[in-house]
Amino acid sequence: MAGTGTAHLREPGETLLRVENLVVEFPVGRSGLKVNAVTNISLDVREGETLGLVGESGCGKSTTGKAIMQLPAPTSGKVLFGEHDLAALKGEELRVMRPRLQMIFQDPISSLNPRRKVEDIIAEGLNIWNIGTEAERDAKVNELMEAVGLDPELQRGKRPHQFSGGQCQRISIARAVATDPKLIICDEPVSALDVSVQAQILNLLEDMKARYGLTLIFIAHDLAVVKNVSDRVVVMYLGKMCEVGGPDDLYANPRHPYTAALLSAIPVADPSVKPSERMTLGGEIPSPVSPPSGCRFRTRCPRAQERCASEEPQMQQIAEDHFVACHFPLNPGETLTNSTEAFTA
């Protein structure tokens, strides 16, 4: 399962962003040990595309997004944005690239400076880079506020604590779009919001994408949300990639056991479906300080065999634009049954 490889990558000239063999490690105090947060991740995004990045908490989704932004810089690997390798840039060279990539954070309230007015928050990037005249910057702020559904005449002078969570996320979106970026990384932008507000923010992101010609990386653990917004989906587990494909095919025919288990966890609005009859995973998630050898999912996988412990699976194509890193992938239409047994040697 969770493996490596670049078979799923498209030609370099076709993509806006291309990440190759990304590694992010964090030291554990003075012990000399390291947390293997992300290990040899490779992905790409075409201009105008939305890439969904999914997996359970702790799989490395947000770390991948922040490493692309160089916040912090990855331990190793390439982050090719256009003709530039962001991971190789330093100082002023990296700084001049910053306006072209922006990020929308998970907590819409804490990501905004509570002491600043909304107009100053949205205009911060414009002021730092001295984009346009003062009148043009004011007009840009008004335009962005109207685009995200806020009334500039009534709300320019307010501060974040005077807004709801959904309104604060609208402000965050306006701030991210202000410098006319090419790529925006959305780090679970709706997970902290009410369900009714989530739909509004998702629709707003789609509208802003079309209006401003944006390319998005959408990070979430809600697979139902990701399916509706993504052109391509990447499934992660414990810092590795499991499966890559278009949302329709991946959701209809998951070929990786972990993907199948994630999809089985999506709530079904049918009282006749019993939770006990649906596929569930046993065991605990291994520590990223000392991950399992070979396939990292093998300690919880009902299909694991001896080969999974000794050989790391490589990403392989199994259908058009559908790739999986698994020695024993599921057949189309095959479902997993509950099992508490897994290969743990």
Image (cartoon, rainbow, N blue to C red):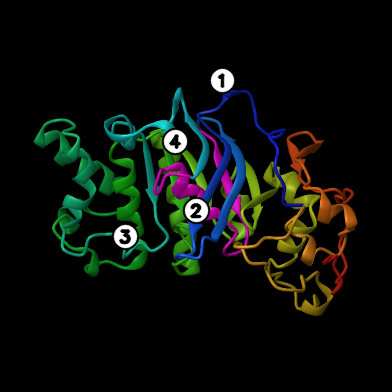
Name the residue beneath numbered marker 1: 13
Q: Horizontally, is 247 left or right of 154 in the view?
A: right
Name the residue beneath numbered marker 4: 87
- Residue depicted at x 48% and y 66%: 196
Q: Horizontally, is 158 left or right of 108 in the view?
A: left
Q: Which residues are magenta?
A: 48-74
Name the residue beneath numbered marker 3: 111
Q: CB under 8 Å between callouts 3 and 2?
A: no
Gap between marks 3 and 2 measured at Cα: 17 Å
- Residue depicted at x 22% and y 60%: 113
**Figure quadrant of the C terminus:** bottom right
Is disc 4 surrounded by few (<14), some (14 to 19) or many (20+) residues within 10 Å? many
Q: Which mark is residue 63?
A: 2
Is disc 1 surrounded by few (<14), some (14 to 19) or many (20+) residues within 10 Å? few
Gap between marks 2 and 4 measured at Cα: 14 Å
Viewer-nearest of labels 1 and 4?
Answer: 4
Say above or below: 232 vs 334: above
